[in-house]
Image (cartoon, rainbow, N blue to C red):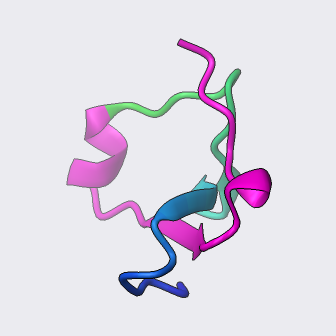
Amino acid sequence: DNNSPVNKYVKSVTINGKPLDNTFGFEHSEIKAGGILHFVMTGDKNEAMKAAF
């Protein structure tokens, strides 16, 4: 949601309705089985998810 050239930061991600954060990953098989990977974008760098790598 909210994808545009201005909104270039990822605010949140869910997979099959579950939040995807720094502690939760997902398996390729979930996507292959028809899972939904949902991104919410923002233009505000302060609202963006922080990477933990």
- Say whether residue 43 is left or right of residue 7: right
Image point (68%, 34%), residue name: 50
Left or right placement of residue 34 versus residue 13 in this view: left
Instruction: State which quadrant residue 2 falls in.
Output: bottom right
Q: Is residue 35 magenta?
A: yes
Eyeballing the image, is 5 above or below 39?
Answer: below
Q: Residue at 78%, 53% (x, y): give it.
A: 46
Give the residue furthest to the right. 46
Kindly identify the residue that appears in the image at 47 percent across and 81 percent down: 6
Measuring 21% from the left and 51% from the top, which residue is drawn there? 32
The magenta span reads 28-53
* 26 sits to left or right of 49: left
Coordinates of residue 36 in the picture (x, y in percent): 42, 66
Asked if the magenta segment contains residue 30, the reply would be yes
Depth check: 46 or 14 in front? 46
State the residue lying farthest toward the left. Answer: 32
Between 29 and 10, the one lying in front of the other is 10
Which picture quadrant has residue 33? bottom left
Total count of labels: 0
Q: Residue furthest top?
A: 53
Q: Name the spot of residue 20 as percent of width and height, x first.
A: 63, 43
The vertical placement of 31 against 53, above or below, is below
Counting from the top left corner in percent of width and height, residue 1 is at 53, 84
